[in-house]
Image (cartoon, rainbow, N blue to C red):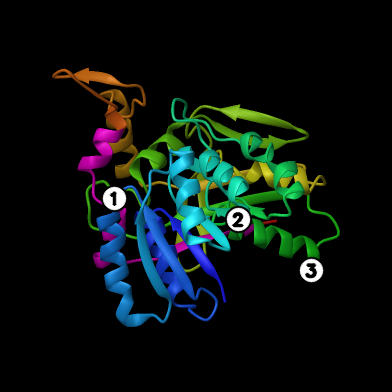
Amino acid sequence: MSRVLVIGCGGVASVAIQKCCQNSDVFTEMCIASRTKSKCDALAEKLAPVTKTKITTAQVDADDVNQLIALMKEYQPDLVMNIALPYQDLTIMDACLACGVNYLDTANYEPLDEAKFEYKWQWAYQERFKKAGLTAILGCGFDPGVSGVYTAYAAKHYFKEMHYLDIVDCNAGDHGKAFATNFNPEINIREVTQKGKYYENGKWIYTEPHEIHKPLNYPNIGPKESYVIYHEELESLVKNYPTLKRARFWMTFGQEYLTHLRVIQNIGMARIDPIMYNGVEIVPIQFLKAVLPNPGELGENYVGETSIGCRI
């Protein structure tokens, strides 16, 4: 029996929530909370006929530690699943520590004013969670997440030493849209437009965005042009598997996607700093997010396969 508080109700969160509800013997009670309660209510209503999980909803601003603490004290969860924005990881972790609740997220912290993600901010919490007798599991999505599980499984069952690791992420699906992202557009665009970075011979090598690329062959899909980008699990894996001589992360992008991305950058719509428009302060990439297709609605007409794994 478990009581889980899920913070977030976007595209990724709604998938995770539905998966939890398919395992109602484990996730017996759940509260879905986000800034927009109506989204939580709609998802809870959709799931009610098909799950035995008892679902309630709440409104919370995940940037506000006091609101988070109040909700946790009221709901008394065993676990908080943070599937909100990466900007909010630290406030949610602070609230978990204040309330004595275990923590799990799917993506590491990223400061709002800089397109950069590193584990240093969250790793700084390790001793505090340990002292409180609490567990905090970071990056428990697919990549990061399952990619780390694959690496650990390989180290345990197949190799005495691992020297070379390539995490490969191929999206060969087609959603029928001219341009869309498979998760939050703001986070996705910030992630794939920053400089590349990979680990080799004890140091980090930096590259220009999409500078290193080549075709890789994927099961059931075939060859797809793949690009070296930085992804946070590399930082954790090279730390925990010190025999690694090189570790890289590859992701596929179609030419149409890259063309749209280049235009978005060239016209300033990927900017993360505020600008004034008709007397109102807006952030261009957040405005862009509002007009792009909702990732949570792409599945309806989706065809094709995704292939994600580790080559060791």
Residue located beneath label 1 in the image: 36
Q: Residue at x 43, y 44 (%)?
A: 67
Q: Which mark is residue 312?
A: none
Residue 63 pos. (x, y %): 43, 38
| Picture coordinates of residue 140, whole percent (x, y) | 57, 56
> Which label's residue is closer to the chain start, 2 or 3?
2
Q: Residue type at mark 2: give it.
A: Val
Q: Secondary structure at mark 3?
A: helix
Q: Is residue 28 above or below residue 90?
A: below
- Categorize mark 1 by other alpha carbons within 10 Å: few (<14), some (14-19), many (20+): some
Task: Kindly identify the residue that appears in the image at 81 percent across and 61 percent down.
Answer: 159
Secondary-structure class at tag 1 = loop
First to last magenta residue range: 286-310
Tell me how far mark 2 sits from mark 1, CA to CA. Answer: 23 Å
Near mark 2 (Cα within 10 A), the count class, few <14, some 14-19 or many ≥20, is many
Dot 3 alpha-carbon crowd within 10 angstroms: few under 14, some 14 to 19, many 20 or more? few
Mark 2 or 1: in front is 2
| Location of mark 2 (residue) | 101
**Circle 1 or circle 3, nearest the eye:** 1
Q: In the figure, 250 relative to 37: above or below?
A: above
Residue 158 shown left or right of residue 306 in the figure:
right
Which amino acid type corresponds to the residue marked 1 in the rendered image?
Thr
Q: Is 277 on the left or on the right of 275, as rendered?
A: left
Give the image quarter of residue 201: top right
Residue 261 locus on image (x, y percent)? 32, 35
Give the secondary structure at mark 2. loop
Between 127 and 196, which is closer to the camera in this rendering?
127
Residue depicted at 79% across the width and 64% down the height: 156
Residue 41, magenta (yes or no): no
